[in-house]
Image (cartoon, rainbow, N blue to C red):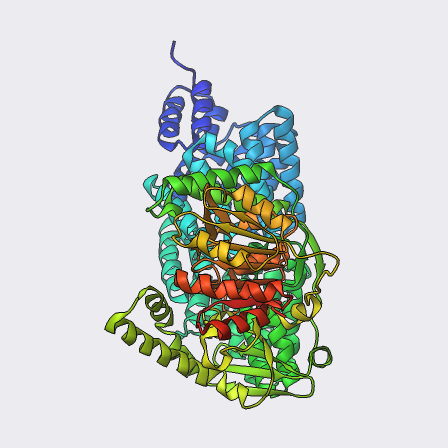
Amino acid sequence: MPLSATELHQRGVAAANARRFGQARRALTAASARTDDEDLRARIDGTVAYVLAQTGRPADAERLSTAALARPGMSEETVAVLSGQLGTLLLYSGRLDEAEAMLTRAIRVVAAESAEHANLLMNRAVVRMQRHELAPCVADLEHAAAIFEAAGEEEPLAEARHNLGYAALLGGDLVAALALMTRSRPALAATSDLAAAIGDLDRAEVLRDAGLTTEAEALLAEVAVQFGAQRMRQARGEAEFHLARSQLRHDPRAAERTARTAVRRFTALGSDGWATRAEAVRLDARLRAGGRTDPADFARTASALRRRGFRTEATGLALTARLGGRGRMPRLPPDAPTPLRMHAQEVRAVRASAAGRDREALRAASDGLELLTTWQQSFGALDLQASVAMHGADLMFAGLAAAARTGDPAVLFEWSERARHLSQQVAPVRPPHDPELAGDLAELRMLRADLAGTDWSGDARVRALRARVRERQWSTTGVGGTRTRIELAEAQGRIADDTAILAYVFTGAELQCVVVTASDARIVPLDWPGVRGALDGLRADLDVAALTRGGPMAALVERSLDERLRVLDDALLAPVRTAVQARRFALTIPGILAGIPWAMLPGLSGVPFTLATSVSRWLADRPTADRTRAPRAGFAAGPRVPRAEEEIRRAAAAWPSATLLTADDSRVTSVTDLAGESDVLHIAAHGRHATGNPMFSGLELADGTLFGYDVDLIPHVPATVLLSACELGRSSVRWGEEALGMTRVWLHAGTGCVIAAPVMVADAVAGELLSAVHEGLASGADAADALAAASLSTGLRAPFQCHGNGF
């Protein structure tokens, strides 16, 4: 028996909701041919209009909906349903005021607590979302979710929760956003691959706002391909729009190209609102890239955004247009999101600097960064704290540049500390034990082993697990208090007479150093072009030098490396050393200098120094020896390191007693247990630095990789950690001023000092030098003193250096 028109319509609706549009179109065509009922025919046409809009024909969809609404003889409820469908189409085209009016009209008529009522609430919530009216948006979504939950409708309930996650994203709560979207994804993915892709489009926005642009852009590229394959041109344009927004900060030229493509796609579809949004991104990108822009284009586009209901984006574009210093600042609404309020302070800082009002620029930049600090206080996870610093990068550089122009050491020191604290202001508490997180990390280790020799990060299973690990860590890590930032006078009062602080500051264009002693402070300008030239090729020279043994090639490589290190020494240390006499140094450095092997520079040969995360943290967390018991030392050797066991046995000989784990015994659990029981931990293993997310950097052990996330789960970490592993002293520059690497993971977990190298080190050199370091540590010397003495006693020049509180 053939299906009735009503049954075919229901089948078409189900297929359309599952994004199976070809199947939906066939069912709806058959339904329309089998009915003379005006109400049913109108509802069929409304669903067909939805399919047309989703498959790239929004103009045809709107015409069909408008024609259906004009037919006589329909019930009030059918008119309401069609009004809601037309409102949804207007939403897709970016006509928000008209969309809300139509949806509200429908909501008032359609039966309360029905599925159709809930769907209308969902769509009106999206309108309010795009207007950044979050309280009424959340109210609509929670009401819709309650209706779906009462009816046992799991799939639409998942979509409502997902949208609540998107509202949390707009409100700045990234952890809640990701948690809600993650919880909803399985139900959405069970509906169809396209439903999952639409959810992933929003998840990519969370990652982008969290500063994880590499992952966000990879996800956006994937979903764009899926949308293109299904001829969902509107959705593909939205993916391109969000990709352009992600590219804005790190590649404005690419952002301009991507946004231009999105403008063309939306214009062809008749999605004028979306085309205007994409044009705003294109103008912003062109300005950031240094291209010529016409103020009239900004004014015209901002006005169009405002007319269409995108008031937050209109204000943002109007602010960007004021970077050139012309025109009055637009007024921000009281509920403006944090990034927009920060952008306003950035514009004020830039305009004040251009007018020579540096003190005003500093106030504006400071106020903007205080907004960021308040936002960061909701996060405890290290990678999230560091990555959201993206939003403060422009403010930070504006402040640093203005501080440098004042010529006041106290002011520049204050801003150096601000830069160092950008991802360290929040002191996290230790996360609770999470067996599911531990299980995910164990599975990830097995996959990495299975995919050895390949680009494991590209595997779909690996990507899914990495995402789950990151998201669980974000949601389970608590937040402690805010770390205090000290001023210059207080720092001077707390350092010894034989100690100097060298606070290196990069303004984005210049490099300077604030040299601080107990009795003096001065600013020393440095040769940034010279430093930049010497940095090019430094890593390659260091790696080749570590691998080359004997012969004429070794001598040639050594000469090239010596010359490069001499240039760096002349540019970074010689001007500073002429300004101060000290026995030891605490250095703070910007991310741009993170890859320098400071211990190999002639000016620091045999000199105790430490690379402090910040002066404030260094002075607050100075090491204090526990004289009530002997320090406990632990040693672990990783597999496939020829001299690892020899190295740890030799180093352990310096201690009256020590615990050793051989290569076969060094498993992740045993090493983390050993870490929890040790005051000094030495690991000799292969290391790997993961640039995309350094929390996935790790040490290769018998049963797989010990990741940064594993370290962050150790309840009590050693006071001193020695990493005899190539690359794990290396950091990734994050947003110009921040660096995050495996050393930072240990420091974040509570370790006082990490001795590690930013580049490759020959096994023989590492074994001999670090054995001598242990002799100093066992005798009670501070780590920086022990490392400097070991370098002098062995005559070895190696890139091992102290990170954190070396003394």
Give how far across and how far down residue 487 sits, in percent: 70, 77
Residue toward you, 105 or 783: 783
Q: How many numbered tags mark residues here?
A: 0
Q: Is residue 6 left or right of residue 493?
A: left
In this picture, is 287 found above or below 161? below
Single out the residue that lies furthest toward the top.
1
Is residue 358 at all visible to an observer of this figure?
yes
Residue toward you, 635 or 23: 635
Q: Residue at x 73, y 61 (%)?
A: 627
Give how far across and how far down residue 310 sits, in percent: 55, 56
Q: Residue at x 62, y 70 (%)?
A: 614
Q: Residue at x 39, y 31 (%)?
A: 20
Give how far across and how far down residue 370 sits, in percent: 67, 67
In this picture, is 654 found above or below 349? above
Residue toward you, 206 or 647: 647
Q: Is residue 552 left or right of residue 439?
A: left
Q: Is residue 166 left or right of residue 545?
A: right
Single out the residue that lies furthest toward the bottom.
578
Is residue 249 at all visible to an observer of this figure?
no
Single out the residue that lies furthest toward the right.
628
Rendered-image quadrant of the N terminus: top left
Rendered-image quadrant of the C terminus: bottom right
Give how far across and how far down residue 271 sits, in percent: 43, 51
